[in-house]
Amino acid sequence: MPLDRRIAEVTDRIIQRSENARGTYLDRMRGAAEKGPVRAHLSCSNLAHAYAAMGDDKGTLTADRAPNIGIITAYNDMLSAHQPFQGYPDLIKEAARARGATAQVAGGVPAMCDGVTQGQPGMELSLFSRDVIALAAGVGLSHNCFDSAMYLGVCDKIVPGLIIAAATFGHIPAVFAPAGPMPSGLPNDEKAKVRQEFATGKVGRDKLMEAEMASYHGPGTCTFYGTANTNQMLMEFMGLHLPGSSFVNPNTPLRDALTTAATEKALSITALGNDYRPAGEVLDEKAFVNGIVGLMATGGSTNLVLHLPAMARAAGVLLEPVDFADISAAVPLMARVYPNGLADVNHFHAAGGLGYMIGQLLDAGLLHDDVVTISGDGLDRYRQEPKLDGDKVVWTDGAGESLNDRILRPTSDPFQATGGLAELKGNLGQGIMKVSAVDPERRSIEAPVAVFQDQESVKAAFHAGDLDRDVIVVVRFQGPRANGMPELHGLTPVLSVLQGRGHKVALVTDGRMSGASGKVPAAIHVSPEALDGGMIAKLQDGDILRVDADAGQFEILTDGVADRAAATPDLTANSHGIGRELFELFRNSAGPATSGAGCVS
């Protein structure tokens, strides 16, 4: 199938926009690659320090043609998604030794859980942890001892940070090895119902705790389709995972066999062999377009609209909000996974998963097949799914049809004709809205605003009955320069209650919502942010605002707002406590949300 004209036009636009930046990047990467195997340039003393603790592997490490893998791990045992990585380094080293090669843990990176920090001061470090992760991975790889790298990370900022590092060290191959989702627990709609009942005082904290623990109950990613699982989808659509490996549960024979196979792949695509596939060649304009197509077809997390521009910029690729909007207009929504439906990612995987979806999108001309992946040339290989043959992985044809059309549908009969994202533009600035879970009749609202500067004030107004009406809740000074752009997921239950009472309700903010953004329309990532001259800083209670996702409108209807002085916030409380004082440099140097709010890319 020829490439869809609309996808081709967006791709060509990105290629033209990125010509200078991408050309400079590729020149740098090719220059680094031409120097040959990196360990050859280290002195004997350098090498002795690098190999001192490697025991029986020392002889292999000093051999001229034996590849050495650098492992960057986000392991910790507080995060369910990252706890399975504990045993990966030993498994990777064993697999490398069996093939006459070696592997070393080059470094660890931090990994924080937004689920733990939601509504807490630590959430103000969350976005910037992406940049810290990129920097930490860079420190590990700077030892310059590695012929390829394996990246062990799953969740919200971890994968984007690791991609920024992989692109920066783009002269060496990069293989991403996932941990997989935890088995299904309490259904997500039941969990959401208990949260709303707690918000209105119908149940106590004991019932809320019981529901939460039944939902998040074991090792692996949370099973809803939030940012963590959207990351895993992206790595497969962009060719950095092995085919079909994203949603295999942890601590299973197939999961371990896939990690061994990923190690074999990392060894086979180095510059020492005949199938060199450096990360910089994989991470090109077409790969990022494919990632955005996957984001829209699955109704994925809005956080990736923030992360993808930062990831791409590290590889010399320049993305803009209009690229997301135009791709969304061309790509049908093929999946219903919570919060866009009742199913979780395990159900999605069983229904045919990413292999079925990639095949459908390729057949419809909505994906670039002519890309470089770690598995070979072309994305067609990613139609396949892994199976165990003894203790080895073999790939077989994936599902030729959806096994549950309430979860996964073909491009010819999607859940809706366009993807899950809308771009908003107008005299308020720019923003985005995830619409895949929002009923069509709720995507347009014109109402008075109620203006706040933090989540707790919104909750207090709700409990006081002040929001029991048609209202657009504006929460400002939540952008990256103000307080690190925390997620405002804690507002979802109360806004859902208001909507459930029959009111027209929306959220407008220069902050973020969770990757689990759901049925309440939320215009987020407003740019310019309030602290950077944005019109959102001039709004007052009672001003009339129109937010129309279908028309892309983002309009202040009250006269004279532009002539007002901007509100002056007291941000002193954001500058200290729970590590926030360490991140002042990041807040001061953060870019706008439209280009990823990055500090290092």
Image (cartoon, helix red, strand yellow):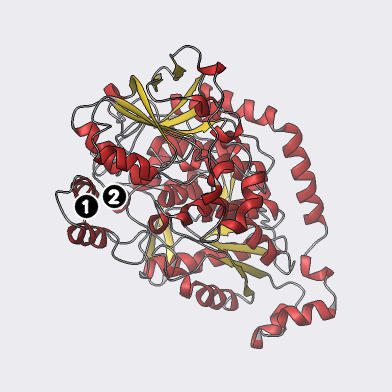
The kind of residue tagged 1 is Pro
Question: Which comes before the other along the chain, label 1 or label 2?
Answer: 1
Residue 114 in sight here: yes
Q: Which mark is residue 344?
A: 2
Answer above or below: position of 170 versus 357.
below
Answer above or below: position of 341 versus 214.
above
Local packing at callout 2 (Cα closer than 10 Å; few below 14, some 14-19, many 20+) is many
Q: Which mark is residue 187?
A: 1
At horizontal 55% and vertical 48% (from top left) the residue drawn is: 572
User: Quick one: 437 or 42, which is closer to the camera?
Assistant: 437
At horizontal 78% and vertical 78% (from top left) the residue drawn is: 47
Could you say which quadrant of the image residue 417 lies in? top left
Spot occupied by residue 358 in the image (x, y as percentages of width and height): 43, 41
Spot occupied by residue 175 in the image (x, y as percentages of width and height): 57, 58
User: Quick one: 55 or 553, which is closer to the camera?
Assistant: 553
Q: Which mark is residue 490?
A: none
- Most extreme residue toward the bottom is 55
Name the element at disc 2: loop
- Most extreme residue toward the left is 202
Answer above or below: position of 412 versus 313.
above
Contact between labelled residues 2 and 1, with CB atoms less than 8 Å apart: yes
Name the element at disc 1: loop
The kind of residue tagged 2 is Asp
Total count of labels: 2
Mark closer to the observer (1, 2): 1
User: Quick one: 589 or 340, which is closer to the camera?
Assistant: 589
